Image: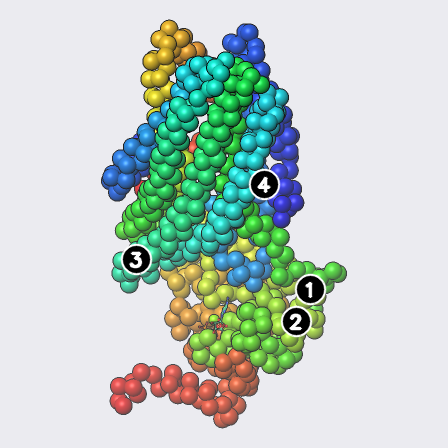
Amino acid sequence: MIKILVKQIGEYKKDAIITPVFTVLEVVAELLVPYAIAALIDQGIEAGTCVTSISTAASASAGFACNLRQSMFENIQTFAFSNIDRFSTAGLVTRMTTDVTNMQMAFQMCLRIALRAPLMLICSMAMCLLINAKLSMIFLVAIVVLAAATALIMSKAMKIYNHVFHRYDDLNASVQENISAIRVVKAFVREDYENEKFTKAAAKLYELFVRAEKLEALNMPVMMFIVYGCILAVSWFGARFIVAGSMTTGSLTSLFSYVMTAFSSLMMLSMVFVMMTMSAASGRRIAEVLMERPGITDPASPIDTVKDGSIDFDHVSFSYRQGSGEKTLSDIDLHIRSGETIGIIGGTGCGKSSLVSLISRLYDVDSGSVRVGGEDVRSYGLEALRGQVAVVLQKNVLFSGTVMDNLCWGKAEGYMDEYRNACRMACADEFVERLPEGYESWVERGGANFSGGQRQRLCIARALLKSPRVLILDDSTSAVDTATDTRIRKAMQTAIPGTTKLIIAQRVSSVQDADRILVLDNGRVSGFDTHEGLLKTNSIYQELYEVQTKGGGDFDDQ
Amino acid sequence: MKDLMPLMGRVMGVMLREYMGQFCLVVALILIAAFATLRGTLFMRELVDVYIKPMIGVESPDFGPLAQALLRLALVYLAGLLCSYGYNLLMAVISQGTLKKIRIQLFSKMESLPIRYFDTTPHGDIMSVYTNDVDTLRQLIGQTIPQLVNSSVTIVITFISMVCLNIPLTVLTLCMVAVMLLAASKLGGRSSPSPAPPSPTRLY
Ligand SMILES: Nc1ncnc2c1ncn2[C@@H]1O[C@H](COP(=O)(O)OP(=O)(O)OP(=O)(O)O)[C@@H](O)[C@H]1O
Ligand SMILES: [Mg+2]
């Protein structure tokens, strides 16, 4: 772990090394001061080296933090969904902010003090030994005891800090949820409830922090106890030595001044230890992110073209938490020909989204295999695969930028008529072209200034622009009126006949004229046939059809 | 730096509103602890002059008075030690409590803001108020404030004892300190073009 973190100092090594050098100079200057006649000049030197070492330490640690953040960010970009699920978004946020700040502070402190304090300590100890070896033995014993006590306290505190950062994650999760879902919170007037939830999380964090800090507060009296004990002992035995004639009063006085120097460097050291315990927990959390290997990577020799749009599921099982035994999909065996239009239908949470996420390899299967164009998805390069399998996610997102920027995202260099074409197919042209600035209109973050249906249509257009071999629409027309929905499906039928289309829907009307319809039930295939076939054989489908075609009127009659 | 003063005032305001009693107690405890330290320093001077010198060359020296003095000192030290433990404990509660209070205030303030605010402010910025900015406050409260109180008490006590000991030397020392501070601020100002501090006041 330390090796990984140290590597991140990177180009700031120079500053990191210079700092201790300046610190040594600083200590030397400080120790020389009492002996120097021209005290003024020496103080000038000291102030100079001191300021220099502060600024190099600051630059080294800021650089370190910057490198840490950058590497974490780069690594996170390679993460698969499963990696992100493991850390949670809020957890990653805490790691990139609070934990890095802790590391930065600790690093800066270490550079400045971790060398200086022990150096001062050793020097003053050496002076004590020179003055009176016998008396200094008291000192040595004291330091051993002190080290043991500190280690004990710190190891206890460390355990608490490990919990503290978990709480931080919870707190940030609560904040993040509230920021991104503020509309829901407001719509349901849940502010008080959320406030209460946050207050609880904050209180928990407070408790843990107070517990850790109270433990650390013990450090100070323990240290004072030992140092004061030393002073008393030195006074007593020193007096005896002097009276007996084996020591002079002058050396007793200088002994005291060195004891005080040692005392202050011990104080600084314990401060460093406090910082270190806190940052050790942070360091571990950062190292975890840096060491995390993406759960999904390109194979050694990736295939980079998808031959056709056929999709095969061979006895696929899948669960979000591997080894939990709880299967989200079990024994799925499907064979879809290139160019077919497949409807997927089934109750909420039955695994429709999970099924299609396996096709673009957002997750990997537990057993069995998924093949696209006849090859296992794991043998493609991710870019090639995802370039050819376009998914319009259930939770679609637009980014801040112009409408054009958002569309370009699907394809690097498009031409105006291609955009128009895609928008026409997705029925997005009707409202985009009515906007005063057309394709240059600004999209707010998350697409907040577009309606739900408009957003969905823009996302479909974005996916169409990739001219993919496989197009997956995960409940992508749920917010579009039925007539437009039909028009979109008709347009796709005629415009991209070669593309395999998977349409997940809640409405039977959205899938009934697909070539075949897949009925999922609780992670298993319940039926896979044409509309007519299913109506005859599949009870789940029959039920759905009855309820949806007869409409709400029947319920009123009952 | 200019932003820091009103911020400090605000944080101190929250702190004092919540923990007035405890804070006064902390100041009192710090005073006692500092006094104990001072007592120890003064004793070291006395040790040689008052207790050891008279015993040198005496046939059968009487260590009784010294033992008594050391015992008294030990008691003073013990008191100082307990006080410093006490104020560290209190400080943990005060600083973390203040942070908790600020976090909660931030959050409920955020919940009360109109949706327009969330549409127009980058979410990352809002998030960073809770992470980076509150962390900066944590540093400020957890380290700077106790240090500030501690150092100012130490300075005052040292100054008083210096005045008691020798007035001309005190004046000289003060001049030297002024020169040093001036030099340090000049040098410091030049060599650290530190990035602008984050402004934790945006939301709060
Ligand atoms: N990221 C995840 N981590 C853990 N479990 C998940 C995750 N996503 C989904 N699940 C679980 O997997 C199951 C299937 O979810 P899935 O999203 O595939 O359902 P769905 O059929 O798409 O439902 P809907 O019609 O509501 O979109 C659900 O029980 C859900 O709890
Ligand atoms: Mg779904």
Helix, strand or loop under label 1 = loop
| Co-location on one chain, circles 2 and 1 | yes
Where the C terminus of chain B falls, by quadrant? top left
**Total number of numbered labels?**
4
Give the Cα distance between marks 4 and 1.
32 Å
Subunit bearing disc 1:
A
Closest to the observer, A230 or A13: A230
Q: Is disc 1 in contact with disc 3, using a CB cutoff of under 8 Å?
A: no
Q: Residue at x 44, y 76 (%)?
A: A348
Residue A1 left/right relative to A207: right
Above or below, comparing residue A552 to residue A170 in the picture: below
Rendered location of residue A364, percent (x, y) = 61, 68
10 Å crowding of disc 2: few (<14), some (14-19), many (20+): many
10 Å crowding of disc 3: few (<14), some (14-19), many (20+): some
Amino acid type at circle 2 is Val
Give the Cα distance between marks 2 and 3.
49 Å
Q: Residue at x 52, y 79 (%)?
A: A523
Q: Residue at x 30, y 87 (%)?
A: A554
Helix, strand or loop under label 3 = helix
Residue lying at the far right in this picture: please name it.
A301
Rendered location of residue A352, percent (x, y) = 51, 74
Closest to the observer, B56 or A230: B56
Q: Residue at x 46, y 52 (%)?
A: A160
Q: Which mark is residue A380?
A: 1
Amino acid type at circle 4 is Asn
* Residue wearing tag 2: A372
Amino acid type at circle 3 is Glu
Q: Which mark is residue A196?
A: 3
Eye-nearest disc, 1 or 3? 3
